[in-house]
Image: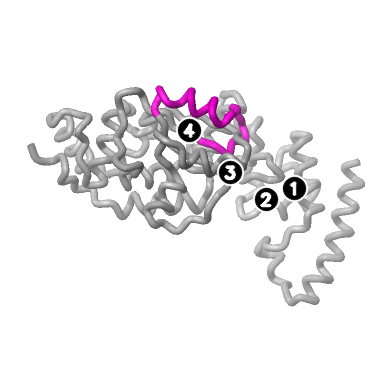
Amino acid sequence: MLERRLDIARAGRRQLSVERRRMGAGDARARGELVDPLSVALAVELLARDVPPAAGITKYPEVARVVTPMDALDALSVPEAAQVLRVDPSRVRALLADGQLDGQKVGGRWLVAGPSLRERERGPHEPGRRLRPANAWAVLALASNEDAPWVSKHESRRLARLLAARGLAGLVGRLGERSRVERFFAHPGVLGSLQRARNVVPAGAQAAREQGERLVSGQEADLYVSERGRAALVRRFALEPSDEPNVIIRVLPDGLWPFSDRRMPLAAVAVDLAELPDARARRIGRQLIDQLEVVPTAGASG
C-alpha cells in the first residue's frame, strides 16, 4: 500500500512539474511553497507507521517536501522526543502546545525540531524558582507600569527591584505558575459566546487583538477564569478535555483577580503570546516583551 502511494505521488509530481513550468513557478518548488497533497498523504502514512523522519526522507525523498521549513533531517516524532526527554508522549505534546518546544504539524501529527529538543534536554531552563501566582501577576503589572494592590508595598518594591535587575525577558521563565492551564474542545458555534461570558478575561491572541495588535482572528478561545468560576463555565459550554483543543482556560486561584474592566496588563498579553504554539504569535509576543519598559514606576516608590 505504501509503495502504491509512492507511485501515485511520483506521478502527481510529474504532472505538477508541468503545471509549474506553465505558470512560471519554477523556483517555488525550492522554497517549498507548492506542496502536492499526495506527498502530504505519504508523509502522514509514514508518521502513522512511526517511521523516523530522517529515515523516511532517505528512503522516500518526497517526504522532504512536506516538512519544510523545519530541517526535516533534524526532526523527531513525538514518541522519539518522549524517549529523549524520558517523559510520556502526552508531555511532549503539551510542551509543543505551550511553545516550550519548537515543532511543526504534518497532517495533524507533530514533528519536534531537534535543536529545540536538545536545548530542552540540556536544561536547566531558567535560574531561580517560579514565582507564586500573586507575585507573578505583580511582576506583569509592574512591567506594564500598573499597580499591584494584591501584594504588600514591601513585596511590590522587592519585585520592582527584581524586574529592574533582570528585565521582563529574564523573568519569563519564572512566571509559569501565574495560572493553571487546561485544554478543552468546544463546539465551534459556542466559541464567540464563551469569549463574551461574564467573569472571564480574554487571553493570548484575543487579548492582543483587543489591545490593537494585528493578529489574524483564530478559531480558538483563550481566556482567564477564577477557580470558582471554572466548573460552571465547563458545564455551561459542555467543554471536553482534549489533546487537540480549541479552548484554552487559564485558571487563577480564588482570591486573585489582577484584571480591571476585562483588560489584561500588556506584559501579560506579551507573555501569553510568547508561549503560544503559533510562530507569528510567539514572534509578536517576544517583540512586545522587548519593547516594554522595564523601569517600573507604579510600585517602585513607597
Task: Tell me which label, 3 or 4, sits earlier in the chain.
Answer: 3
Amino acid found under the numbered disc labelled 2: Val
Task: Tell me which label, 1 or 2, sits earlier in the chain.
Answer: 1
Mark 3, other Cα within 10 Å: few <14 / some 14–19 / many ≥20: many
Q: CA distance from mark 4 to mark 1?
A: 38 Å
> Which quadrant of the figure has residue 168?
top left
Residue corresponding to mark 3: 103
Residue corresponding to mark 1: 57
Q: Which residues are magenta?
A: 226-249
Q: Nearer the viewer, mark 1 or mark 2?
A: 2
Q: CA distance from mark 1 to mark 2?
A: 10 Å
Residue shown at the point (41%, 50%) measured from the top left: 208
Per the image, label 1 sits on a secondary structure element best described as helix
Residue corresponding to mark 4: 249
Q: How many marks?
A: 4
Q: CA distance from mark 2 to mark 3?
A: 10 Å
